[in-house]
Image (spheres, rainbow, N blue to C red):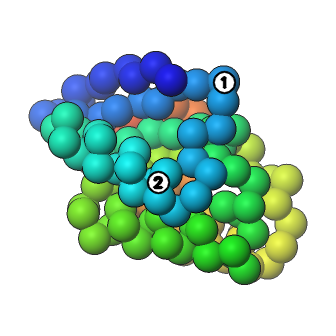
Amino acid sequence: MQLKSHTINNTKIAEIVSDEIIIESAQDGLDLLGDMYYQGFDSIIIYEKNIIPDFFDLKTKIAGDILQKFSNYRVRLAIIGDFTQYQSKSIKDFIFESNNSRHVNFLKTVHEALESLSN
């Protein structure tokens, strides 16, 4: 796992880069959040490929558990990927609603994530 640090408009953003799955459980999400929070990051960017596919099956509750922690600690999160592959109405609605909030966004590019998280 590699950490790229970005600072835009006094917002410290951590971009997590890896070829492996980093988040396999809600605890992994909490550990990542805690580590980045401890290092002084206000926001985190992670790639869809680094999250277990069960995250996108809302019945598992992994997404809800993880995103609730980010909201509680007021750390913003951007998940980068192509989400068109997820066809269930519930995940589409979840992504839509998340993108209307300021805490969690599902975006296509790092550029979009940096822009969103720095505002």
Q: Nearer the viewer, residue 88 or 21?
A: 21
Image coordinates for residue 112, horizontal then vertical, percent:
49, 38
| Residue position marked by numbered label 2 in the rendering | 29
Is 42 placed left or right of 64 in the picture?
A: left
Residue at position x 13%, y 34% from top? Answer: 10
Picture layout, residue 54 above or below residue 32: below
| Residue position marked by numbered label 1 in the rendering | 19
- Amino acid at circle 2: Gly
Q: Earlier in the sequence, mark 1 or mark 2?
A: 1
What is the crowding at mark 1: few (fewer than 14 residues within 10 Å), some, or many (at least 20)? Answer: few
Farthest-out residue, left = 10
Residue 118: tell me if it is visible: no
Image coordinates for residue 84, horizontal then vertical, percent:
80, 53
Determine the image quadrant of residue 68: bottom left
Picture layout, residue 95 above or below residue 1: below
Image coordinates for residue 20, horizontal then vertical, percent:
66, 30
Q: Nearer the viewer, residue 49 or 85?
A: 49
Residue 103 - label: none
Residue at position x 67%, y 61% from top? Answer: 55
